Image (spheres, rainbow, N blue to C red):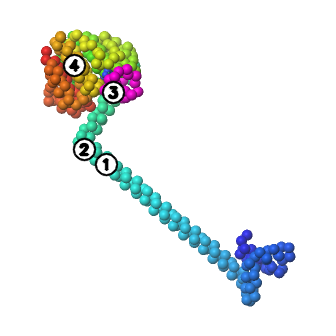
Amino acid sequence: MGTLKKITSRLTSGKTDRMRPSQDLVPTTAKQPSSGLMRRLRDLGLKRGAVSLFFRRILKKQSTRSIIEMGRTSISKSRSGISKATEVTGQELSSRAKQTARSIKHHSKPENLNKDYRKLLHLTQEMGYDRAIEKLFFVPAKGFVPLDELTIDSPNRQFGHNYHPIHRLSFNWAMAQIPDQLRDFTFVDYGAGRGRALILAALHPFRKIIGVEFAKELHDDANMNIAQFPRSLMKCRDVDCLLMDAVDFPIPESKGVFLFNDSFDREVLETVLARISSSYRTNPRRMYLIFVRPLNAAVLDSLMERTVIFEPIYHSQSEKIRMQILSPDQVQIFRTLI
Ligand SMILES: C[S@@+](CC[C@H](N)C(=O)[O-])C[C@H]1O[C@@H](n2cnc3c(N)ncnc32)[C@H](O)[C@@H]1O
């Protein structure tokens, strides 16, 4: 009990120091400086009740003061808390608003609008038109696989592009540009991945279909997909995927349709084009080269011009517009002069 309270309670109960038993009183009075004060107050002629009242008031005032003090402290603390919170939220809000504004600015640039639109087309193709064929695959061909995760034994690994499958729409549109009887043609997919293009080609009456893939895991998946695909749907059943580098693939003697779906860099493409051109010179024949998502239209045009044996196939205006609106990928087709 605090000293003031002790004094007050004694005063209220009517006991004084003199009235207390000695053993209780002596050490207490000796220790309490306030009792001297009380005595002095009484000496001044104040009555017991008045002293008690005086102390009660002091105590009351004291607690009132401390309550007020506490109130003030908590108000000032909560004020600083509120201002701190406003400061933090304000900062967050403004940084978020800035981020959103930056993102709107970025996405509204014409080149980015086009990119976003193509992305949307990729998604809609993957979720819509591609699903019909995807359902028949043993190992799903859809998705993206970076080459770093794969087993590749080739110095051209550094020039290879990551795996993602061709869209059915792009494939069918490219095939629609070939007027010849496919029975005489061998189809080659340079960088066959999990074999989606090989299976799509097998729905056409090609003489033979060959995939060339240097990543072991993808090559195995492709052969699994070929083996498990319903034979009744295949117009060409001579389908195979070879585990090898595109630069080592011997060009078939027959007429050919060669697919390059975003397969590799210019360094590898130049070597492959040189092999195809040399094979053509010894045995001139019809060949089609289909480029899906080509490196860069201008670079490709100049590479193809240098071969001297290929010319581009120009699409009709209506076809161009249709593809611009619907196709997520750019497709360029070249054919040999004969
Ligand atoms: C974009 S994917 C195309 C997949 C498949 N052609 C399709 O359309 O579904 C490109 C593929 O080329 C393969 N590739 C890259 N460079 C290669 C090379 N030098 N030889 C063989 N395959 C290669 C990659 O492993 C990858 O699977």
Q: Which residue is mark 2?
A: 109
The image quarter in which residue 5 lies: bottom right
Q: Is residue 267 left or right of residue 65?
A: left
Q: Which residue is mark 1?
A: 102
Q: Is residue 150 left or right of residue 332?
A: right
Q: Select label 4 or label 1 by which is in front.
A: 4
Which quadrant of the picture is home to ligand 1?
Answer: top left
Q: Which residue is mark 3?
A: 158
Mark 1 secondary-structure assignment? helix
Rendered location of residue 156, percent (x, y): 32, 23
Rendered location of residue 135, percent (x, y): 37, 22
Could you tell me which residue is drawn at 72 percent across and 80 percent down? 52
Of marks 4 and 2, which one's residue comes earlier in the chain? Answer: 2
**Neighbour class for label 3 at 10 Å: few (<14), some, many (≥20)?**
few
Of marks 4 and 1, which one's residue comes earlier in the chain? Answer: 1
Up the image or down, 166 lies above or below 79; here it is: above
Could you tell me the amino acid type at mark 2?
A: Lys
* Image mark for residue 33: none
Q: Magenta span covers which residues? A: 141-167
Give the spatial CA distance, label 4 vs label 1. 46 Å
Could you tell me which residue is drawn at 29 percent across and 25 percent down? 263
Taken as a whole, is the magenta stretch helix, strand or loop?
Answer: loop
**Neighbour class for label 1 at 10 Å: few (<14), some, many (≥20)?**
few
Q: Is residue 248 visible?
A: yes
**Neighbour class for label 2 at 10 Å: few (<14), some, many (≥20)?**
few
Q: How many marks?
A: 4
Of marks 2 and 1, which one's residue comes earlier in the chain? Answer: 1
Of marks 1 and 3, which one's residue comes earlier in the chain? Answer: 1
Give the spatial CA distance, label 4 vs label 3. 20 Å
Q: Which residue is mark 4?
A: 274
Q: Is mark 2 within 8 Å of ligand 1?
A: no
